[in-house]
Amino acid sequence: MEIVILFDNAADSAILAAKGKTAPIVVDKSDCAGVLRVAGDLQSDFERVADIRPELLSALPNETDTVVILGTFGKSTLIDDLDRFRMVPVFSCAGSAARLDRHHT
């Protein structure tokens, strides 16, 4: 099983919550109702685990190191733009949920 929560800073990791701050969650308001619900659930999960409630945004913030982006191909302009500019690896995921690995820039 893959470890998904670390309490130490690993070399190839993204810090989602530390020192009173969290990575914001970004989701397109026009995405599927289920994705919007999951975004709210994830926001609550962060608060339970890290005792900090992340911002829930509908667009990328101007300044931040890390964001959590949720969305559906074909329903989220942000996800479609990331795909169009090849900023996320795309896997065959028709009819199923998919996980996109973090892209290093």
Image (cartoon, grey):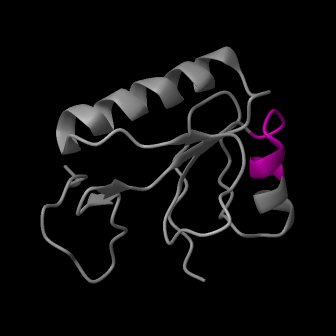
Which residue is painted at 54% across and 68% down in the image?
64
Please say if 13 is above or below 38.
below
Give residue 60's quadrant in the image: bottom right
Q: Position of residue 8 (x, y in %)?
A: 13, 70
Which residue is painted at 54% across and 19% down in the image?
37
56 or 73, nearer to the observer = 56
46 or 98, nearer to the observer = 46
Segment tinted magenta in the rendering: 73-80
Q: Is residue 23 visible?
A: yes
Decide if residue 20 is on the left or right side of residue 76.
left
All told, the count of numbered labels is 0
87 or 93, nearer to the observer = 87
Please say if 55 is above or below 17.
above
Q: Position of residue 40 (x, y in %)?
A: 48, 25
Q: Position of residue 16 (x, y in %)?
A: 35, 58
Q: Position of residue 59 (x, y in %)?
A: 72, 48
Q: Is residue 70 visible?
A: no
Which residue is painted at 78% across and 39% down in the image?
76
Decide if residue 90 is on the left or right side of residue 74.
left
Can you say which quadrant of the picture contains the C terminus? bottom right
